[in-house]
Image (tube, grey):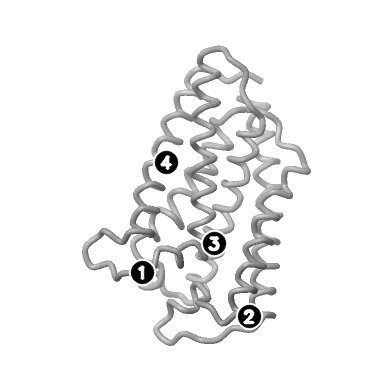
Amino acid sequence: MERKKWQIIASITINSVIIALELFSLAEVFFRFLPGTEPFKWYHSLTYYTNLGNTILMVGCILCLINDIRELKGLNTFRLFTVFKFTGVIVGLVIFITIYIIIILTGDLVYGFAVLGNSWLFMHTLCPIFGCLSFILFDNKQNIKKLDVIYPLIFTFLYTTMIAIINFAGGRVPYVSDLEEPTKVSFWFILGLGLGEMAIATGSAFLVRFIRQKVNARI
């Protein structure tokens, strides 16, 4: 299905905004250049689901921009690029839903700033929301198949496996090590959290796919 020109322009605009926000946030995460930010070893940042997930979302937005430009020029677009963006969107929703579940359970909005730092607003809220809206409303209309749901699940599974290995080796476990009173976690806690995130990813993937199909059929 072809898009109207205004949809392509809207997709270019929103994806460009997401990329800008992601570049700023990820640069801050890895290089800590904002005033008052405590130093942090850059390679520890690679162990956070948030950072890796937002990196995938940013790359997906870049690939969507390529598809947008090609469609404006009347060229063929790549379904693989759309699937990559889909993966980033779902991972972003896992980040968004998980963190707001924690905020609701703790009843403390300050948690976002106190624990997650400067990246909270962009990487946990705006980028996931903008990414989902752009994918449903404006991005390339290429079909997302049921089997495509497996990609965000694979990412979450591999991430959970990595954290389990880090914990087993006695390394720095992300998130729990950021608390004022760091605590040790068991393999079963990591497994349970990973399964929970995979459940969120599965539900989000099928829901986004369903809504996107309905929207594409109407617009």
* Residue with the mark numbered 4: 19
Mark 1 burial class by Cα count in 10 Å: few <14, some 14-19, many 20+: few
- The location of residue 2, given as percent across then percent down, is 62, 18
Residue at the image point whose x is 49% and y is 48% from the top:
129
* Residue with the mark numbered 2: 168
Left or right: 165 with respect to 6? right
Residue at the image point whose x is 29% and y is 71% from the top:
38
**Residue 49's disc number:** 3
Q: Nearer the viewer, residue 137 or 59?
A: 59
Q: Amino acid at mark 1?
A: Phe
Q: Quadrant of the N terminus?
A: top right
Mark 4 burial class by Cα count in 10 Å: few <14, some 14-19, many 20+: many
* Residue with the mark numbered 1: 40
- Gap between marks 3 and 2 measured at Cα: 18 Å
Q: Nearer the viewer, residue 212 or 115?
A: 115
* Residue occupying the far top of the picture: 74
Q: Amino acid at mark 4?
A: Ile
- Gap between marks 4 and 3 measured at Cα: 18 Å
- Gap between marks 4 and 1 measured at Cα: 23 Å
Left or right: 194 with respect to 55? right
Note whether 138 is above or below 104 in the view shown.
above
